[in-house]
Image (cartoon, helix red, strand yellow):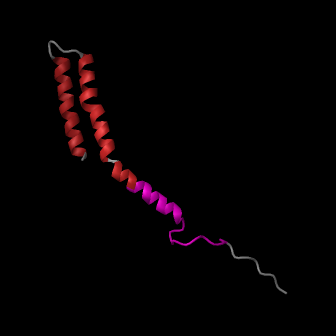
Amino acid sequence: MYIVAIAWIYVVLMMALAEALSANGSVLGAIVTFTMYGVLPLAIVLYIMGTPARRRARRAAEASAAAPDGGGHAAGDPVAAERKEP
């Protein structure tokens, strides 16, 4: 998934450079091109594509919080009670 994102940013960067270095282009146009064609759409797509991974991580964190000792049982007293002699 990240190789496609890197390739897309590269293509958009080349478009922005062509815009900035052309005779009719401007640096402001290059910044707008890079933002509107590259950063904004890519951020939205990566956010949507990363949703299942975030969901899995959240469920795993909730599962580990439910069993802090890792054994699946509720934790007991950490120190044994002191026994008094009769």
Q: Give residue 5's position: percent from left, percent from top.
A: 24, 40
- Magenta stretch, residue numbers: 56-78
Judged from this view, the residue extending furthest toward the left is 23
User: Is residue 70 found inside the magenta-colored segment of the image?
Assistant: yes
Q: How many marks?
A: 0
Q: Tell me the quarter of the picture where residue 74 sits.
A: bottom right
Judged from this view, the residue extending furthest toward the bottom is 86
In the rendered structure, the answer to whether residue 22 lies left or right of residue 71 reads left
Q: Nearer the viewer, residue 27 or 46?
A: 46
Q: Is residue 51 above or below residue 67?
A: above
In the rendered structure, the answer to whether residue 83 lies left or right of residue 62 reads right
Q: Residue at x 24, y 29 (%)?
A: 37
Q: Give residue 46's position: percent from left, percent from top.
A: 30, 42
Q: Is residue 21 above or below residue 10?
A: above
Q: Residue at x 25, y 31 (%)?
A: 38
User: Is residue 67 found inside the magenta-colored segment of the image?
Assistant: yes
Q: Is residue 34 above or below residue 6?
A: above
Q: Is residue 26 above or below residue 14?
A: above
Q: Residue at x 15, y 16 (%)?
A: 22
Q: Give residue 68's position: percent from left, percent from top.
A: 54, 64
Q: Residue at x 63, y 72 (%)?
A: 76
Judged from this view, the residue extending furthest toward the top is 24
Judged from this view, the residue extending furthest toward the right is 86
Q: Tell me the quarter of the picture where residue 9 sits.
A: top left
Please state, as top left, top right, bottom left or bottom right, where the C terminus lies in the image: bottom right
Q: Give residue 66's position: percent from left, percent from top.
A: 52, 63
